[in-house]
Amino acid sequence: MEILEVRKVGEATIVKMPKSVDSNTAGDVETQLLTAIKAGVNKLVCDFTENNYVSSAGLRVFMEAFNEIEEKNGKMAIFGLHEVVYEVFDITGFTDVFPIVGSEQEALDCL
Amino acid sequence: MIHSLVAITISSITCALFAYVAFRLYFKQQIQTNNTGVIILQNKVLFAVLYGLFTIYAGFIATPNGATVRLLGPLFVGMMAGWRYGVLTSLFGVALLCMKEWLQYIPDIQLVGNTFYSSVLSTVLAGFLAGLWHKRLKGKLPRIWQAVVFCVAFELFVHLPVTLIVAWPFAVVWQSAKISFPELIIANAVGMGVMVFVIGNLIEEKLALLERQRINAELVAARVLQQGLIKKKNPEPYRMPGIDLYAGVVNEDQASNSFFDYYYSESGRKLYFCVVEIAEITTKATLTMLVIKTLFRTKAKRAATLQSIFSNIQRELKAVEDTRKNRSAFMGIIDLDTGLISERIARNYCAVVRNNQGDWQELHEVSTAEDVLRDGEILVLASNSGIKTAAGKNAKDWHSFFDNTATMQQSGEKLVAFLKNNDINCCEDGAAVMLIKYQKPAERIALRIELQEIDRLHDWLADFAEKQKIAEKLLSTLKLVLEELVVNIIKYGFGQDVSADEKIEVQIQLADERIVIQIKDRGRAFNPLIDNLEKPRQKRTVGGWGIQLVKKSAHKLEYERQDGFNIVSMEININGG
């Protein structure tokens, strides 16, 4: 399992997404995000700057995480989407669900 | 007078017949010649003796006025073989005169005056002077008028003066000569003219035969050369993924100097091809062909620039241009990555391409090399303009040789058979045809029924994209679309206890401006376009994201169940949309 890089910036937790969130890696990402949320993280920022591929399996993970964090009245933001990945979020309507922004600072400001 | 003319005619015809029969039976084989037209008779002694015997015979068929064509033999032999042989023949004439003079062997002829010595001298001079003329002719056969003029001149300026001076008594001889010399002149001139005509024809016939033999010998040599160095007449169809190629020569029964060749570049990404016809069936032409072929092959390997190879070949073609009118050549390089002809030369060629709309277009109408051949198009090269006439002036007529399902082998054989069965000028000297159908190869992968295979699928797509120079963005789309469809199949098409042999076959192909994808599996019937098996797990989940992404990216998307297979076919436009 690829361990995701996690940083704390104030109250927020920033998790760096892997290069690809596909059917194979989605499980690992899901486990780590949900574990973090269960452990009390309620301001989550997903850093996509190094990611360039997300399939529907990946989308499902973020939806799971989002639902989970909402239940805890937490917040979640996404930044640094690659053009292609943004399209994937856009086509599936995910851009209406998450705050999707350009930079880390903007993401932190959303929370 | 009429009686005399008949006698002269008989003499002349006899001369001609004699000459004809003698040459036909024997001397024709004896004629040797080189290209300068010099006649070299072998066995000249026999030739002189035969004409000597003829001279004796001629002495017996004199006209009532005593004119004979006995001088024809020495004149003719001298002219054909030189003064020594002319004089040898003359000696037979002298023998004839001796028979007359001493033996009185020819009682019919009324001898007028004492002409023995004058006749002997004239006879010897005939052979000798004709021999001198032979030398002046340098061994060539004179024209008919030259021979006639020579004979007349001999009679007037040699025979007649000699007779008048040497024979006696003058008054009697002069009376007799006034009557007999016109006949003599006519008889000898006609006889000589006829003989030169007959022999000239025979010699021409012989020269034609020798030329034929030479050409045949060259043909044999050329055929050996060709068979040794050129591809066999019915080549194996060219089998390279994405290229369906047929090449053949129309008339393979002779070394026609029509040839084709093709080979890959060292990288294997380029196809070099040529179709050439040099309409000359000589060794020179064959050698030219071999030079072209060698240039075509070796220069490229020495990494000379293609332009230099082509200009060398152009030069070679130009070298044979002077002698013959028909040479055709088409050479080019097909880039196997793009399907375009990157470089080409063409001379008097006949070539057509089929464009994307299925229309046939003549190659010379295409403005730039880049426009020539696109994926999946057919290129036909035919190295003889006669083929164009035969197969139709209009490029559209080429439709009859092709249908979409035929391989190039089938179409090519059809075309060649048509050309052979229709007596068309292109078949005389042969012609080469080459048909190339270009299509990007389809790439395939078989995936096991497990999610880990997605990694392999992605790597495989990345390789494909790199090879086909596909942009990164499009690669992401391909990865996404295939992942969604394959994951669907893995999740819903098969149960838990799936056999290890079970595979999902994915095929991808670059064609024109699109990427054609096919996914095939033997799972249970499942149409991913309709059957939505993703159950919303959360209130906000609309589900079906995967298929949503696929539908959005695909230009064309179809599902069918066939022979127990689920087949999803899809096309994605390279330029988006």
Image (cartoon, coloured by chain):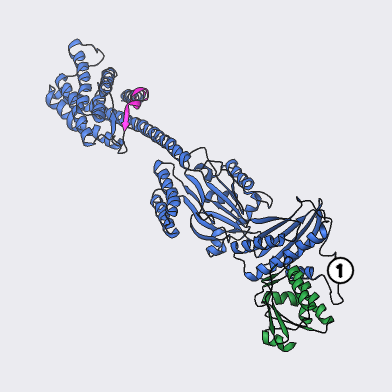
Q: Quadrant of the N terminus of chain B?
A: top left
Q: Position of residue B266 (x, y in %)?
A: 50, 54
Magenta stretch secondary structure, dominant: helix
The stretch of residues the image draws in magenta is B21-35
Q: What is the quadrant of residue B160 in the picture? A: top left
- Chain A rendering hue: green
Query: Could you say which chain is coloured blue in the image?
Result: B
Viewer-side residue, B138 vs B245? B245
Question: Which residue lies at the image location 15% right of the left edge and 29% below the top edge?
Answer: B161
Q: Secondary structure at mark 1?
A: loop
> Would you say residue B452 sits in the magenta stretch?
no
The disc labelled 1 sits on which kind of residue? Lys
On screen, residue B269 versus residue B496, left or right, reads: left
On screen, residue B529 versus residue B452, left or right, reads: right
Q: What is the quadrant of residue B158 in the picture? A: top left
In the picture of the structure, the residue carrying the numbered disc 1 is B535
Crowding near the residue tagged with mark 1, few <14, some 14–19, many ≥20 C-alpha atoms within 10 Å:
few
Is residue B82 at least partly visible in the picture?
Answer: yes
> Would you say residue B28 sits in the magenta stretch?
yes
Is residue A92 at least partly visible in the picture?
Answer: no
Q: Chain of mark 1?
A: B
